[in-house]
Image (cartoon, rainbow, N blue to C red):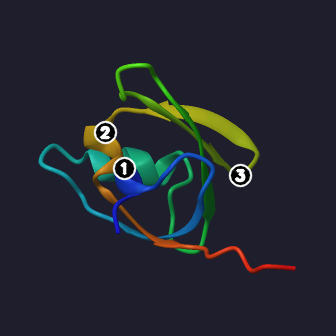
Amino acid sequence: MRLSHLPIGSEAVVRGVDPGRAGEGRRLQEIGFVPGTRVRVERRAPLGDPTVYEIRSTRLALRRAGADLVDVELIEERDA
């Protein structure tokens, strides 16, 4: 699943990052999108782009094109 497809409030674990056409994926890895890292979807802009994500206690905004490069696995919440 791609990071851009996650609903607001959901959490996932990064599984990998595609390199992209101009090496955008490398930049994403440099800012923390590495395999095994948890990421949470905070909120989206009114028109749907960009989206704010929380990763390693930092909030950052990514456009959909960047988030499409990040492959994630959704973390399912368990009922308590």
Left or right of 63? Residue 77 is right
Q: Which mark is residue 56?
A: 3
Residue 71: percent from the left, percent from the top? 37, 67
Crowd tier of the residue under label 2, counting other residues whose Cα lies within 10 Å: few below 14, some 14–19, many 20 or above: some
Residue corresponding to mark 2: 64
Residue 38: percent from the left, percent from the top? 64, 64
Identify the element where label 1 is drawn: helix
Left or right of 59? Residue 74 is left
Which residue is painted at 25% across and 40% down in the image?
65
Cα separation between marks 2 and 1:
6 Å
Residues at marks 2 and 1 touching, judged by CB atoms closer than 8 Å: yes
Identify the element where label 2 is drawn: helix
Residues at marks 3 and 1 touching, judged by CB atoms closer than 8 Å: no
Above or below — where is 8 with respect to 49?
A: below
- Reading the chain from its start, which is encountered first: label 3 or label 1? 1
Amino acid beneath label 2: Arg
Residue corresponding to mark 1: 4
Crowd tier of the residue under label 1, counting other residues whose Cα lies within 10 Å: few below 14, some 14–19, many 20 or above: many
Q: Nearer the viewer, residue 32 or 67?
A: 67
Q: Could you tell me which quadrant the N terminus lies in?
A: bottom left
Amino acid beneath label 1: Ser
